[in-house]
Image (cartoon, rainbow, N blue to C red):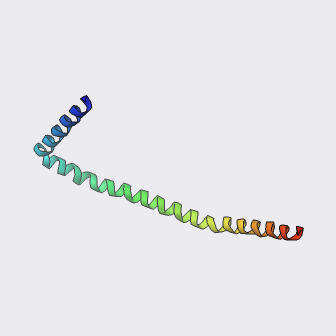
């Protein structure tokens, strides 16, 4: 129950603060937006590079797996 009361008080004070200092909030958002976009760009770039590296390494490991499977199947065929 105390956490509900605290939450309601915090929400009401936050809404009051937004209404009183609206232009300060807008200035903060205008300043943080480019920084957020730069950070998001770095994350997307890192994800793309990681995926590209994984894609380049994957065919080699898949060829090795296929080769192992073919060797195992040929050995199994020799036993029969």
Percent x, y of residue 69: 75, 67
Judged from this view, the residue extending furthest toward the left is 20
Furthest-right residue in view?
79
Front position in the image: 15 or 34: 15
Would you say 62 lies left or right of 19 here? right
Q: Which residue is drawn at 19% across and 36% down?
A: 8
Q: Which residue is drawn at 13% across and 44% down?
A: 21
Q: In which quarter of the image is the N terminus?
A: top left
**Residue sitting nearer the eye, 46 or 62:** 62
Residue located 33% across and 58% down the image:
37
Q: Quadrant of the C terminus?
A: bottom right
As drawn, 61 above or below 32: below
> Which of the 4 image quarters holds residue 44?
bottom left
Question: Within the image, what quadrant is residue 75 found in?
Answer: bottom right
Place of residue 68 in the rendered image (x, y in percent of width and height, measured from the top left) = 76, 65
Q: Residue at x 56, y 63 (%)?
A: 53
Asked if residue 35 is positioned above or below residue 11 in the image, the reply reads below
Left or right: residue 27 compared with residue 20: right
- Determine which quarter of the picture holds residue 41: bottom left
Residue 74 x/y as whole percent: 83, 70
């Amino acid at each position: 129950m105390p956490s509900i009361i605290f939450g309601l008080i915090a929400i009401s004070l936050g809404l009051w603060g937004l209404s009183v200092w609206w232009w300060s909030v807008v200035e903060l958002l205008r300043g943080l937006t480019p920084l957020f976009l730069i950070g998001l760009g770095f994350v997307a770039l890192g994800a793309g590079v990681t995926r590209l590296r994984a894609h380049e390494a994957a065919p080699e490991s898949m060829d090795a797996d296929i080769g192992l499977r073919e060797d195992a199947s040929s050995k199994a065929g020799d036993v029969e």
